[in-house]
Amino acid sequence: MTSSYRQVNKGSPNVWLLDILKESIAKSDISYDESTIVAKFSKSGLCVACKGSKFLCGKTRCPIIVKANYFLKSIPLMQSEDIVGASPPSVFVGRIGYPYVYAGPLVPPVQEDTTIYDLPELWFGKTIDEIVGFRSMLIRGKHRVHVQKFEEAGKIIEKTRELALAVNSVDVELLLKSKPRGSIVLDDEIQPFGPSAPIRDLRVGNARWDHHIEKAYGDTDLKAAEAVLEIYNRGVFVTKIQRAFSIGAFGLEKNRRLVPTRWSITAVDSILSKDLMEKVKTSPEINEYRVYESRYIDNIFEVLMIPGTWSYEAMEAWYPGTVWNPQGRNIVMFSDWEGYNGRTTYAEIGGCYYAARLAVCEKLVKERRQATVIVLREAHPGYIMPVGVWQVRENVRNAMRQKPSNFNTMDEALKFIASRFQIPLQQWITKSELLKNALFQKKITDFLMKRGSLA
Amino acid sequence: MFKLKVSDAKLLRDMTTAISILVDEATFKIDPHSIKLRAMDPSRVAMVDFEWSKTVFEEYICTESTKMCINISELLKLLKRAGKDEVVELSLDEKTGRLQVKITGKYTRNFTMPTLEASEEEVPTPKLTFNVRAKATTGGLSQAIEDAQLVSDHVRIEADAEKIVFNATGDLMGATISLQKGSDTLLDLEAKESSKATFSLSYLSEIIKAAAATSDIATIEFSTDMPIKLDFQQAKEGKLMFYLAPRIETE
């Protein structure tokens, strides 16, 4: 979801935003052309009253000011139609207008190793500011193409794919039809990036491809899902697989297509965790109640593992003032779950459901154990803007790397979770299908024990 | 040696479907008189108890008692290839440990599938005393469950001497479905004392829907906060019963 903004015209009641920008520009001594500044602002009336000074929305910092700051830093990027730099590599495939989408590379005007700019696997521990900082340097080149006819789309898409499959950053000359413009897009599923413009021409330096990905690319009889699994099992980062997936590098020849970036992220998380789940289901159940924890950019995860057969639930609670609950007075909770046999519909809470599922399955498969897993997330007001689904994947992966707190009973485990969270336990239980199940659903074996045995 | 022949493929397919609701890998006990299965689902919330006497089959040969474990969903895939009046023969090749599935109709198909390591677990039946015993049509039960599913994931079943009531309460909506004794749906009802218990609707609906294909009338038995037993009356000599553990909400 892109936050809702609209353009500020001079004389509109929201001139204050432009004023803030101008003020900051004067301070930071940047020369700029007034016509290139497009300020977009939240529709919320609160912002007008607050103007970034009173934190009326409840966040700990004003996201508009934070965004404005990075927007200003990217102004120098908007001065030229020709971008020369090293792409991490990175590509973006939009979803608007599907099946006619905008695809193209993301290139920062930086000529050094930029690998980290598009490798969330290495981002855990960085602040929101650091991440938005380097992401806002990425200029997006856009080329309109039909997702299934990308092979006929010519050189630009061919070159984009060439760089997408590269193992390290690639030197790129991105020639645009106009000076790039736009604000930083902040999205819950995709990593933020900077200004954009249509591509005039694209030149790509020598790119060395990841050979596992190259092999799958060359195999036009290998199904996409199988390719994804194969490459993952060879130890390639999820981000790299997802990048190749989005640029149509996998699958049977006739089925190959471009996949919008945000869809490809969830597709890969889903394909991988589905496969891992089958392995989990053949492993012995854990013997104790475990709670894993991770805290990062004001997102708190408590992962509860219950002895039992595989089933999975992801729940998130948004404090008033956080990204998806800006106006609310109450905490908003979302939940989605699946039983032993999995699910056939898309989880309502979206990509994070699948990202967290991958992280917990990785852990269980590594340990060769089975459990009922409930991922609980509290998003606090310091999480001022969405940074992408990777945050969930890496935060839960981090939780899985920690030593869990072990308990003998469900009661003790829940008491521990209650002590780590601010939201009362009862609220979690009321909303959680699997917690209720674990607490209330009896087993046939409970009734076998009662008779004929000492218990 | 073990071999059986069913002249109506649908019968075998429907029974296999009903078993597949709970178990994926099923260990059948086979003796010269019958084929049996008693198993719990992976989360041990429900149990299936199945038996077909040799008289169900057109041909049934079992020379010595044995166990056979097969992947039910794989078998089901093969059985789905058989038309209504086609003949199905299952035979176990003891040397290779493979099960042969022969479907004969307009033409002949021979499939083979592996057998798996038989489970050693002996599953006893729960010894329960029930206070309520009701006989109902499976069609009527299916409908009542579907109604309740509109508003919630679980249902409280209450019974007294006169009626059975299904009560479902969701976040926003509620539903009460009453079956009166002697109605077209509720054929018979005996209640030693008023009883109520809550059950998962997803289990109930899957069980009843699948079992309804094999049976028109079910006997349900339960007591307050105890498992429910659903006995689906079979046309031929055999049984298909399910037990489902209750939900008990406590603070």
Image: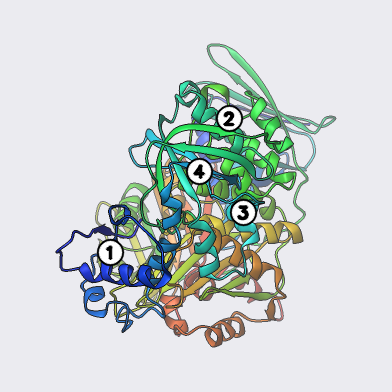
Q: CA distance from mark 3 to mark 2?
A: 24 Å
Viewer-proximal residue among A455 and A383: A383
Q: Nearer the viewer, mark 3 or mark 4?
A: 4
Label 2, label 1: how many angstroms apart (C-alpha)? 41 Å
Report helix, strand or loop for mark 1.
strand
Labels 2 and 1: the sequence-earlier one: 1
Q: Check if mark 4 and mark 2 are on a common chain.
A: yes
Q: Secondary structure at mark 2?
A: loop
Q: Residue at x 78, y 42 (%)?
A: B65
| Disc assigned to residue A83 | 4
Discs 1 and 4 lie in a common subunit: yes
Kindly identify which residue carries mark 2.
A251
Locate residue A80 relative to residue A450 in the image: left or right: left
Chain name for mark 1: A
> In the rendered structure, are the residues bearing label 1 and label 4 in contact, judged by CB atoms less than 8 Å apart?
no
Q: Secondary structure at mark 4?
A: strand
Q: Quadrant of the N terminus of chain A?
A: bottom left
Quarter occupied by the C terminus of chain A? bottom right
Report whether mark 3 lies on the same chain as mark 4: yes
Q: Amino acid at mark 3?
A: Leu
At label 1, the amino acid type is: Phe
Image location (x, y in percent) of residue A52: 32, 77
Q: Are marks 3 and 2 on the same chain?
A: yes
- Asked if disc 3 and disc 1 are in contact, CB closer than 8 Å, the reply is no
Q: Chain of mark 4?
A: A
Q: Which mark is residue A41?
A: 1
Amino acid type at circle 4 is Ile
Query: Residue farthest to the top?
Result: B106
Rounded to the nearest whole Å, what is the CA distance between mark 4 and mark 2? 33 Å
Q: CA distance from mark 1 to mark 4?
A: 28 Å
Q: Residues within 10 Å of mark 2 (few under 14, many from 20)?
A: many
